[in-house]
């Protein structure tokens, strides 16, 4: 159970039950779809980018606790950030969930550090990163749905 | 050349007579893999619909083949080849008797159920299906019972028609009857659903099709391990099943076809062993079943399947079915009593599968938490996305039984599900 509590930390379960920014964004000027057909995780990420700044970000869809909480916390972490900052945060987040994090990098992630337990469950990395890859695809206006499977 | 008149009995290890009573603990001792710990907990293997485990006798047969008589078949002038050929053809006879086919030549060895269905679509289908024709399948098909027919329909301009189901996961026979019409060329349905566990009324399905002269293929991947299959009593035209779900090795399956149909069908793949003579101008094909077995087959796998069937033959099938029914009833009752659980698939005629969803908890999370408890189940769409859409869900958690499954396995699963609730409360 110790490992499980590492994976399913309180904050993750809480975001799964009450996801933040969980809605369509009428003012979105970018959006993309993320879909992992084997799991059934399926999300749309909406962005409103002005100049180089992410003014607003939201998501909709369904999936497992890890993918949904990751999407929810991502929207909180990236609102108001520049695109370059968003890339840097994703890079740190990716290192964290794949077990390659440096300690100062984890600190800079704030609440997202709760996903450190994912690195012990390699098959769940695809869940934790789906929304992030979808966001990157939205920034590039990619039409095809993204998959991390 | 290939009739196994001189049967070498030592190719398959001897099994100790017929077992008069079904003792599940004794059965479990035949499966070495079951006796291990996973994540520090005794393994509880409930993913038998994905693949079953293999008894010691199958493992020994594979080992013995490679150690003692590995060689190519059907062209040997030497001892090893003759012995391998005999074992291979002996497995064909074992498979023939297992499904009560009339003749060993009606048993074609393929890679699995998927290849068996593709074979029929690409040979019988390409010859007989044309523009505007219709092929009937069902809502509860595995993707391997959908896509091969879609490919054929796209090529020929034919149409797929789909038999609907009710909320319990039972085929609507009246609707099926309405779908059968002058353009119907073929019917292909699962005998048992891999997601719902429903045992379909295949006799009626076949009879209704035959009244209109339409042949029927049954996908028996999930049925063969749990239901006594008698292709002659069913009068099906084709029957497909996989070795690896029947306690045999992976990479091997059987396509049964009525001799008349097989003989009239064009070959599937060209190559060695499927010919009688080749010149650059013309090739004369070999007789069935060899016409459909181009190239060196999975010899070890086929012989291993023979050993699996021989292993199963020592059991009284009615006792196996009774045991599985009892564990299934217990599992359905216990699992559905877990708070928030809803069973997907509650047909009156069911076998070996309990699919379920838990309110507010994604199946993938259920699977991860159970894995920590040493419990192996399957989560996802189970290669049946149209069926998931029918039930309006992206995925299910699925516990599936083998004949070595016990009430204790179910108890462990239910305790695991309570852990899931605890984590998510």
Image (cartoon, coloured by chain):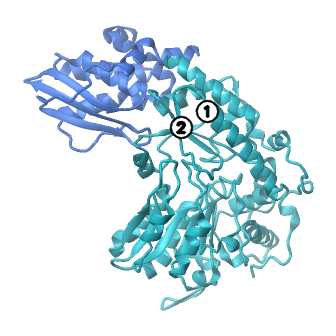
Residue drawn at x 41%, y 49% is B390
Residue drawn at x 76%, y 71% is B93
What chain does badge 1 belong to?
B
Q: Percent x, y for residue B98?
A: 75, 65
Q: Percent x, y for residue B321?
A: 75, 52
In this rendering, is residue B272 above or below B114? below
Q: CA distance from mark 2 to mark 1?
A: 8 Å
Cβ–Cβ under 8 Å for marks 2 and 1:
yes
Residue drawn at x 75%, y 54% is B62
**Label 2, on which residue?**
B356
Q: Quadrant of residue B36?
A: top right
Q: Percent x, y for residue B135?
A: 43, 71
- In the rendered structure, the answer to whether residue A13 lies left or right of residue A60 reads right
Residue B298 seen in render: yes
Q: Percent x, y for residue B83?
A: 81, 69
| Tag 2 and tag 1 share a subunit | yes
Residue B294 seen in render: no
Q: Which mark is residue B335?
A: 1
In this rendering, is residue A89 above or below B279? above
Q: How many marks?
A: 2
In this rendering, is residue B22 above or below B139? above
Labels 2 and 1: the sequence-earlier one: 1
Element at label 1: helix
Spot the cyan chain and give its letter: B
Q: Quadrant of residue B109?
A: bottom right
């Amino acid at each position: 159970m110790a490992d499980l509590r590492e994976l399913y930390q309180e904050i993750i379960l809480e975001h799964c039950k009450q996801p933040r920014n969980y809605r369509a964004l009428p003012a979105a000027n970018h959006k993309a779809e993320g879909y992992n057909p084997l799991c059934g995780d399926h999300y749309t990420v909406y962005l409103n980018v002005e100049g180089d700044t992410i003014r607003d970000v939201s998501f909709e869809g369904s999936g497992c606790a890890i993918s949904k909480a990751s999407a929810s916390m991502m929207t909180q972490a990236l609102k108001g950030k520049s695109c370059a900052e968003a890339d840097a945060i994703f890079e740190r987040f990716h290192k964290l969930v794949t077990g390659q994090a440096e300690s100062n990098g984890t600190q800079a992630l704030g609440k997202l550090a709760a996903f450190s337990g994912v690195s012990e469950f390699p098959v769940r990395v695809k869940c934790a990163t789906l929304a992030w890859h979808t966001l990157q695809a939205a920034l590039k206006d990619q039409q095809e749905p993204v998959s991390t499977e | 050349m290939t009739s196994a008149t001189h049967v070498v009995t030592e190719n398959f290890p001897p099994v100790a007579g017929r077992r008069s009573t079904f003792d599940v603990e004794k059965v479990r001792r035949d499966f070495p893999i079951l006796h291990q710990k996973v994540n520090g907990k005794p393994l509880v293997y409930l993913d038998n619909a994905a693949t079953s485990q293999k008894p010691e006798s199958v493992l020994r047969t594979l080992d013995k083949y490679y150690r003692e008589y590995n060689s190519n078949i059907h062209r040997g002038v030497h001892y090893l080849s003759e012995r391998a050929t005999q074992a291979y053809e002996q497995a064909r006879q074992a498979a023939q008797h297992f499904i009560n086919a009339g003749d060993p030549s009606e048993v074609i060895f393929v890679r699995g159920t998927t290849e068996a269905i593709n074979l029929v679509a690409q040979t019988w289908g390409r010859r007989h299906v044309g523009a505007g024709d219709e092929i009937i399948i069902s809502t509860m098909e595995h993707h391997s019972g959908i896509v091969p027919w879609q490919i054929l329909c796209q090529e020929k301009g034919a149409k797929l028609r789909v038999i609907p189901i009710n909320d319990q996961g039972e085929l609507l026979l009246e609707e099926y009857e309405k779908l059968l019409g002058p353009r119907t060329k073929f019917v292909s349905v699962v005998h048992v659903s891999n997601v719902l566990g429903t045992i379909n009324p295949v006799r009626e399905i076949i009879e209704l099709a035959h009244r209109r002269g339409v042949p029927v293929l049954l996908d028996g991947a999930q049925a063969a391990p749990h239901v006594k299959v008698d292709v002659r009593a069913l009068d099906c035209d084709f029957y497909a099943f996989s070795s690896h779900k029947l306690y045999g090795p992976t990479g091997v399956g059987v396509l049964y076809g009525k001799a008349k149909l097989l003989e009239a069908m064009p070959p599937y793949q060209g190559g060695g062993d499927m010919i009688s003579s080749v010149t650059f101008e013309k090739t004369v094909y070999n007789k069935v079943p060899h016409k459909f077995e181009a190239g060196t087959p999975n010899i070890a796998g086929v012989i291993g399947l023979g050993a699996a069937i021989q292993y199963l033959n020592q059991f009284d099938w009615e006792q196996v079915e009774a045991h599985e029914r009892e564990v299934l009833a217990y599992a359905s009752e216990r699992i559905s009593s877990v708070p928030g659980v809803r069973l997907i698939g509650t047909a009156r005629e069911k076998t070996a599968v309990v699919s379920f969803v838990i309110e507010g908890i994604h199946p993938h999370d259920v699977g991860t938490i159970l894995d920590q408890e040493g419990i192996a189940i399957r989560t996802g769409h189970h290669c049946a996305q149209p069926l998931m859409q029918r039930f309006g869900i992206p995925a299910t958690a699925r516990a599936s039984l083998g004949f070595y499954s016990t009430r204790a396995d179910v108890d462990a699963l239910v305790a695991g599900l309570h852990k899931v609730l605890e984590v998510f409360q």
